Amino acid sequence: MTKTRFAAVIALCAIGITACTPTLRNHGYAYVNGETPVITPGEDNQTTLVNRLGNPSTRGVFETDTWYYISATRETLAYQLPQTRERRIMAVEFDETGTVVAVEEYGLEDGRRVNLVRRETPTRGRELTFLEQVLGNIGRLPAGSFTGEENLPGGAGGPRRDQ
């Protein structure tokens, strides 16, 4: 085997080996040295948390007095779909004055897979095409409603000029 072919084989092997190396990506809140920050209920408040940890990843939808710091590590191997290797969620709950009441931590093992439901709610009547929706109201409104000359609901309102 010539030196050129040998170098080509070595290069292909090196490319093949590096293609199988997993790629790790971190998303969300970055824990310093992998340690959970110390948050003291009763002492810390929203201002101290923002100063030390930054803004939360998200806040509660219905209960905005809960902040969530979310971190995830995903691994991609060659051309496979990424897989979540680690997930950490720190939930910080506040009282009405903004003081920390409770801190809870959740991991990947606490998560649940939720299946997407593809059902649709049917509508009554017939379905309109795009053009029927766009052109459907032409001719239904009086011409004066666009200029504000008629005192109709949704018109320009106010006193009429001819009075």
Image (tube, grey):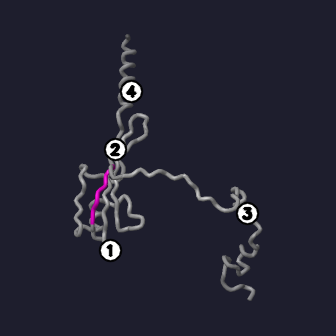
Let me know if residue 65 is in the magenta part.
no
Q: On residue 85, which mark appears?
A: 2
SS category of the residue bearing label 2: strand
Q: Quadrant of residue 92?
A: bottom left
Amino acid type shown at disc 3: Gly
Q: On residue 136, which mark appears?
A: 3
**What separation in Å lies between label 4 and label 3 (alpha carbons)?**
60 Å
Q: Which residue is mark 4?
A: 16
Q: Main secondary structure of the magenta part?
A: strand
Q: Residue, x 31% and y 66% (percent of image)?
A: 93
Q: Which residue is mark 1?
A: 96
Name the mark nearer the viewer: 4 or 3.
3
**What separation in Å lies between label 4 and label 1 (alpha carbons)?**
57 Å
Residue 99, position as x, y percentages in the image? 28, 70
Amino acid type shown at disc 1: Glu
Q: Earlier in the sequence, mark 4 or mark 3?
A: 4
Q: Earlier in the sequence, mark 2 or mark 4?
A: 4
Residue 138 relative to residue 103: left or right: right
Q: Earlier in the sequence, mark 4 or mark 1?
A: 4
- Determine crowd level at label 2: few under 14, some 14-19, many 20+ residues with C-alpha closer than 10 A: few
Residue 142 relative to residue 76: left or right: right
List the single residue furthest toward the bottom. 163
Q: Are marks 2 and 1 in contact (CB under 8 Å)?
A: no
Name the mark nearer the viewer: 2 or 4.
2
Residue 142, position as x, y percentages in the image? 76, 73
Asked whether 42 or 119 is in front, the reply is 119
Where does the magenta region start and end? 102-108
Asked whether 61 or 17 is in front, the reply is 61
**What separation in Å lies between label 2 and label 3 (alpha carbons)?**
53 Å
**What separation in Å lies between label 2 and label 1 (alpha carbons)?**
36 Å
Q: Earlier in the sequence, mark 2 or mark 1?
A: 2
Amino acid type shown at disc 4: Gly
